[in-house]
Image (cartoon, rainbow, N blue to C red):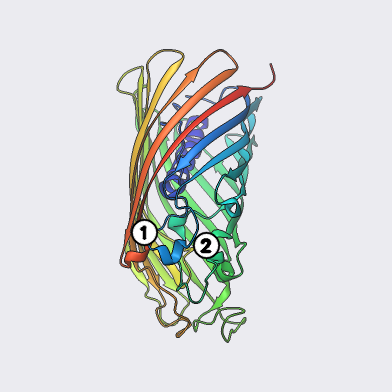
Amino acid sequence: MKKTRWLVLLLSGAAEAAFAQTTATRPSSFGAGPRVNAGAPARQINIRASLEASYDSNVFGFGDNRNVLDTRSKDDFSLTPSLLVDVVLPFGRNSAYLRGQLGYDFHLENTELNRERISLDGGATVAVAGSCSTSASMSYSRLRSNAGDIFIVDPEIDPDFRQVRDNVQERKSIGGRVSCGGAIGLSPSLGYNHTEARNGSSFFRSNDSNQDAVDFSLGYQRPSLGRVALYGSYAEGEYLGRDIFGGLRGLTPFDPNNLDGVKNYSAGVRFERNIGSRISGAVAVGYSWVDPKAINSRRFRGNNYSVNLNLRPTDRLSVDLLATRSADLSNSAFATYSLTEVYSLNGTYRMNPRLAFNFGSSYQTRDYRTEVQVAPGLGFRFVDKDKFTRAYVGAVYELNRRLRINGLFSQQGRRSNDARFNYTNSTVTVGVSYRLGR
């Protein structure tokens, strides 16, 4: 049971990380994820003080429209001091973990973009009666919005462009899960998760949302087969600053008793398997019923899927493959939800014990199910669909047991139905980190 549980936790985390990195200016420089252990994870305490210097050719994520940029510098240098934490503490049959970053971005030219960069993920797993276990998880993030996750309005309405440059996204999540099952036999699992998303800019607070989700699966597992499970899930999300008629809190007539939101039902089958020491992964295929509350938004009936594979063709090379399709709450104003597809590859090639090269690419599409009649006359521009592409290469070199240097080059592009949202940018990052403690 331990093997399956930790496989599911790692793969679900990889999917979330890949989605976030797709629209981030600076993707992770760590390439492929670690190999899943056959049992409980090993004890690990890795705390590092880090300093990264970055050059971004398009720090705002805009095209060449000078009416929008005005006197601002399109490119910029930044420094990010941070504390990196990766701690896993097994104790008996139980374990706890904490991973993430506490940092701050300082920009040379566009100082109004200076913001905290916080991302933390923690939790614990406790064995209970028999072959059952219960786990709890929490996550918190706070950072400036990625340019690809927001939209702009006419410069005449927002001449200082404050709703883009000032917006800080804060996300909190808490969840729990109960799982049972031995090495052979039935393995039921029940989980719950609550997520809150908040925006710092008054304009984007119409996207503030709460979401609650529950899921259940009943599987059968054995070492020679892996785990096959039927699953079902239900999620309900609600926007705190938008109503079902298109009203926006603080901007237009607004009905707080009829908030916009979405209900999402999903069911399907999932297969998880390790094949020797070279291949591990999970594949899920299902069907979704998505019912938006907004009177002008379209419902969705269709398939969803998730593929997470870790491949180790050689002892030096590790590759993660990800493919997902899902319906998600949207941080783009006036979109009740979006149908999102993500395809990514992340790899690590370890030249020797000290030097490793990282590489990756990703492709993401989003189909915004938008209430186009919202707030007419305000001059807003809408994104109905967009596409992201990204590729990166990087290297990490261990100077000694404590000191590490790293470098990364990343290029990203966005294309949408409105040319004002199209942009490309290149990022170069170099950094050094020092391991604290013993």
Three-letter code, disc 1: Asp
Q: Residue 367 falls in which quadrant of the image?
A: bottom left
- Please tell me the numbered disc located at residue 64: 1
Residue at the farthest front position: 71
Residue 424 location (% of width, % of height): 35, 51
| Of callouts 2 and 1, the N-terminal one | 1
63 or 389, which lies in front?
A: 63
Residue 371 at what x, y percent from top left? 42, 77
Q: Quadrant of residue 309?
A: top left
State the image coordinates of residue 137 (x, y, percent, origin top left): 62, 44
How many numbered circles are shown?
2
Q: Is residue 287 left or right of residue 210?
A: left
Q: Please tell me which residue is depicted at 60% across the width and 78% down the height of the picture.
A: 249
Q: Secondary structure at mark 1?
A: loop
Amino acid type, mark 2: Val
Q: Residue at x 43, y 48 (%)?
A: 19
Residue 316 visible to an observer of this rendering = yes
- Nearest to the observer: residue 8 or residue 297: 297
Q: Which mark is residue 252?
A: none
Residue situated in front as seen by the camera: 116 or 321? 116
**Quarter that holds the C terminus:** top right
The residue drawn where x is 45% and y is 13% is 353
Q: Mark 2 = which residue?
A: 164
